[in-house]
Image (cartoon, rainbow, N blue to C red):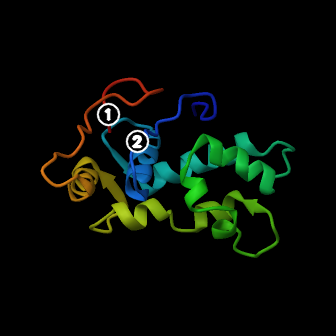
Amino acid sequence: MPSLTGGGNPFSSGSGVDRTFIGAAQTWDFDKDGAVTCDEWKNYVTTLHRESDGDGDGTLIDAEFQTMAKTDQLFSVADRSYYDANGDGKVTVEEMTGKQNVAFKQLDKNGDCRIDRNESVRILQVDAPKGGTAPNTDQQVPGRQGGGY
């Protein structure tokens, strides 16, 4: 599986939580098919958890979780307390993969555990300024090979 903490940050200065989630979702598309599944999310978060676990004990304390949040802004929106199911102050990979991804809650409009380009375009069109157009989602994302999402 590829390293996740060494790449560029895919987030632009766009506004809104939905834009953050769309930017984040682009990094989860491991097979580059233009859609993100729940399984791809679980693979992503498992790898990111392992890379952020500085002491290798299988849990993330606050400082380690903050390191992960610097890599992916989703974890600034859904912070450690969201994922810490048992409230012990540490987050395991099982807690993270066992909790619904907040981006999927908002972006997966048809509930099929798959975020495709059409769902993210609809979000961007709703969020576009009046008289304006939605941003081009086909543009290349920094740190990624190939076209957009």
Side (left or right) of 49 relative to 128: right
Task: Determine whether 142 is above or below 50 in the image.
Answer: above
Q: Residue at x 16, y 55 (%)?
A: 130
41 left or right of 110? right
Place residue 112 in its image quadrant: bottom left
Q: Quadrant of the N terminus?
A: top right
| Residue extending farthest top | 145
For this orientation, the residue located farthest to the left is 131
Q: Position of residue 25 (x, y in %)?
A: 42, 47
Do the numbered discs 2 and 1 sit on residues whose CB atoms are within 8 Å?
yes
- Tag 2's secondary structure? helix
Q: Please, what is the three-letter code of the amino acid marked with disc 2?
A: Gln
Give the residue at mark 2. Answer: 26
Residue 89, compared with residue 116, is above or below; it is below
Please name the residue shown 40% across and 23% down the image.
145
Where residue 47 appears, x then y in whole percent? Answer: 63, 43
Residue that label 1 marks: 148
Alpha carbons under labels 2 and 1: distance apart? 7 Å
Percent x, y for residue 55?
87, 44
In the image, is residue 93 above or below residue 24? below
The answer to which of marks 2 and 1 sits earlier in the sequence is 2
Q: Where residue 65 sits: x, y (%)?
A: 72, 52
Q: Which residue lies furthest to the bottom in this view?
A: 86
